[in-house]
Every structure is written in structure tokens, then in C-alpha cells.
Image (tube, rainbow, N blue to C red):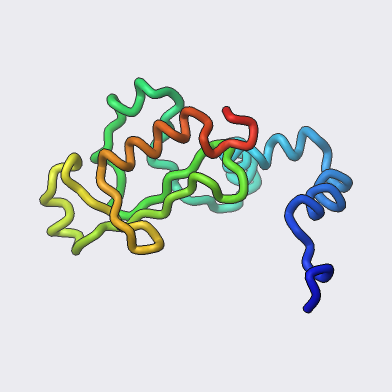
Amino acid sequence: MKTSDILGMNERNLRYIRVYNKREDIRVVDDKLATKQLLKKTGIATPRVYGIIRRAKEVKSFDWNKLPINFVVKPKRGFGGEGVMVLRASKKKKEFLKDPISKRVWLKTDEAEISFDSLKSHIYDIIDGKFSLSGV
């Protein structure tokens, strides 16, 4: 296989996505919540949303105990998977749930541990636009 046989994301977007899709439709699919609502409206199943945090002050008031032991955190308007974290409990369910939320540790897909404080820090980064194409 030659390098010229590989279609990169930028070329794909310019050659196919922008040409065959209306700008307003692209805006919908770039917004994870809008996409979810559209899919739901058409009867397509989507994963459950356990919470939405829009502002930094909401991080403190969020009910962290309503999260399941395994979950995904993602920016509403991320790009290329940036900022997405798939988390799973670092130990058996019973043992994991005995720990207060502030002491829990999850495992990321690369098996690295992430503490509750690091999770909150990541969410602050999302809110600050760190993983967003437009910085929002």
C-alpha cells in the first residue's frame, strides 16, 4: 500500500463530507446532543446520558453518585475523538461502590488510572474548550 492510497481526514472532509452534506446538517452531527435527539426521534437507539455539565460551577453541584461504575465522558463538540474518555471501575463492583466517590479510581482504555479529582479536571478542560475544534 502506498501513502497516496490512504485518504486522510482533511481530504475526506473536503472531497466528500462538505460536498455531499448541507452545512446545517454538518452542524447537527458535530453536536453530540443534537445528533442524539435526531437519532432518538427516528427510533434509533443511543446510549443513555447520565448527565450534562455545561458550566464550571455545575461540576461542583453534579450528582456524581448517579453515574454507573463504567461510563464515557465526551465533549459536546469535540473533534476526532479528542477529549473522549472511556472509564471502567478499577475493582469489582461491590468493592468499588464501598469507596466514597471522592476516593474512587477508574481505569481508562490504556489501563491508566484516573482519580476523581483528575476526572473533574478533565471535565474542566472540556468546558474550557481544550478538545474542541472551535475552542468552545
Residue at the location (83% across, 38% down)? 22
Query: Hey, which quadrant is residue 100 in on the image?
Result: top left
Q: Position of residue 31 (x, y in %)?
A: 62, 37
In what quadrant of the picture does the N terminus appear?
Answer: bottom right
Q: Find residue 122 and report its horizontal and vertical position in percent.
A: 39, 39
- Residue nearer the viewer, 38 or 95: 95
User: Would you place residue 116 above or below residue 90 in this image?
Assistant: above
Q: Residue at left 48%, top 28%?
A: 128
| Residue at the farthest top position | 57
Of 43 and 5, nearer the camera is: 5
Quadrant that contains the C terminus: top right
Does residue 7 sit above or below 23 in this rendering? Answer: below
Q: Is residue 133 left or right of residue 18?
A: left
Figure label count: 0
Judge from the rendering whether residue 54 lies leftward or rightward of residue 17; answer left or right: left
Say which residue appears at 46% left-offset and 29% top-offset.
127
Q: Position of residue 72 (x, y in %)?
A: 42, 50
- Indicate left or right for 5 with 109 as reference: right
Kindly identify the residue that appears in the image at 64 percent across and 41 percent down.
Answer: 38
Residue that extends furthest to the front in the rendered view of this protein: 3
